[in-house]
Image (cartoon, helix red, strand yellow):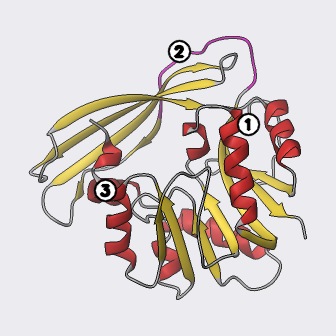
């Protein structure tokens, strides 16, 4: 079982909070040269991050590997959005180039290796306009010790699902191995009266992390980007902390070179 295979539940529980979205808008105002007219999400899921831009009459485009996520995204965004079903390493949009691309949930960590991450960055770069921005979520950890202290990453209140029933979710980090560049994530879901959704299930997956110098080397290998800033959502004021060792879960602001 996987929460990602329940698009409506996923969209309800994991849509961005208004204050988080406002922070992203502030970053766009600070870093983007020229007007914002188009945005793209290379692993869009059910469109949780695209919808707030779509309701502002911006052109939105999204890609996802799962057809049920693309279908839910289409239902939520309508026919004006360009949606594709495919691999985030080989994007195939027709309506770009885009002003802003965003991937804030460390989805790059689902790719199996550095060559896959490089292919993804290259594909995003090719779909950005000159001076366009990529807001890239990544987990940055250095060190030689395995950490097995369970800590909560996110926990929702019980929420009503539009088609009926209620659900709640909890994300935990259960193991971090900086040497192998891996973090094990546990997802626990509780639901009641949600169609085709079990009352409870638990899943674990491994997310690739990056050592600071490895991430710097990856950006240099791909080329075409300048790193403008590094922000952490959980840090008050979200200052630019730079790309440091053990940044944790951060958002890199990348600008495509002219």
Residue 90 in the image: above or below residue 115: below
Please report the residue visible at 65 percent of the width from the left and 18 percent of the height from the top.
Answer: 180
Q: Is residue 214 left or right of residue 84?
A: right
Secondary structure of the residue carrying tag 2 is loop
- Nearer to us of marks 3 and 2 is 3
- Nearer to us of marks 1 and 3 is 3
Residue 237 can be seen, yes or no: no
Is 151 covered by the magenta stretch?
Answer: yes
Q: Are marks 2 and 1 in contact (CB under 8 Å)?
A: no
Q: Is residue 160 left or right of residue 206?
A: left
Q: Is residue 197 left or right of residue 19?
A: left
Tell me where residue 161 appears, x and y as whole percent: 21, 60
Please report the residue visible at 82 percent of the width from the left and 63 percent of the height from the top.
Answer: 255
Locate residue 94: give its quadrant. bottom right
Q: What residue is shown with label 2?
A: 148
Q: Which residue is nearer to you in this view: 38 or 48?
A: 38
Tell me where residue 35 appears, x and y as whole percent: 74, 86
Secondary structure of the residue carrying tag 1 is loop
Locate residue 23: give its quadrant. bottom right
Classify mark 3: residues with Cα within 10 Å, few (<14), some (14-19) or many (20+): many
Q: Which residues are magenta?
A: 142-152
Is 244 covered by the magenta stretch?
Answer: no
Q: What residue is shown with label 1?
A: 247
- Point out the tag, 2 or 1, that comes first from the N-terminus: 2
Q: What residue is shown with label 3?
A: 7
Residue 257 can be seen, yes or no: yes
Cα separation, mark 2 vs mark 1, equals 18 Å
Q: Residue furthest top?
A: 145
């Amino acid at each position: 079982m996987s929460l990602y295979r329940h698009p409506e539940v996923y969209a309800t529980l994991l849509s961005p909070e208004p204050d988080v979205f406002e922070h992203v808008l502030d970053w766009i105002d600070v870093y983007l040269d020229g007007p914002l007219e188009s945005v793209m999400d290379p692993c869009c899921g059910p469109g949780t991050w695209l919808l707030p831009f779509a309701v502002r009459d911006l052109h939105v485009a999204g890609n996802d590997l799962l057809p049920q996520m693309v279908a839910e995204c289409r239902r939520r965004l309508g026919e004006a959005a360009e949606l594709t079903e495919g691999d985030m390493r080989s994007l195939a949009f027709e309506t770009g180039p885009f002003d802003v691309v965003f991937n804030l949930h460390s989805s790059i960590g689902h790719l199996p290796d550095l060559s896959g991450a490089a292919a993804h960055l290259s594909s995003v770069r090719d779909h950005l306009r000159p001076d366009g921005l990529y807001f890239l979520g990544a987990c940055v950890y250095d060190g030689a010790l395995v950490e097995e202290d369970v800590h909560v990453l996110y926990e929702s209140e019980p929420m009503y699902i539009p088609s009926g029933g209620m659900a709640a979710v909890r994300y935990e980090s259960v193991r971090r191995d900086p040497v192998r560049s891996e973090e094990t994530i546990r997802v626990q879901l509780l639901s009641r009266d949600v169609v085709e959704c079990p009352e409870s299930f638990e899943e674990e997956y491994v997310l690739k992390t990056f050592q600071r110098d490895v991430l710097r080397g990856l950006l240099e290998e791909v080329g075409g980007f300048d790193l403008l800033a590094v922000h952490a959502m959980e840090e008050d004021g979200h200052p630019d902390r730079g790309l440091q060792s053990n940044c944790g879960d951060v958002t890199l602001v990348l600008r495509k070179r002219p």
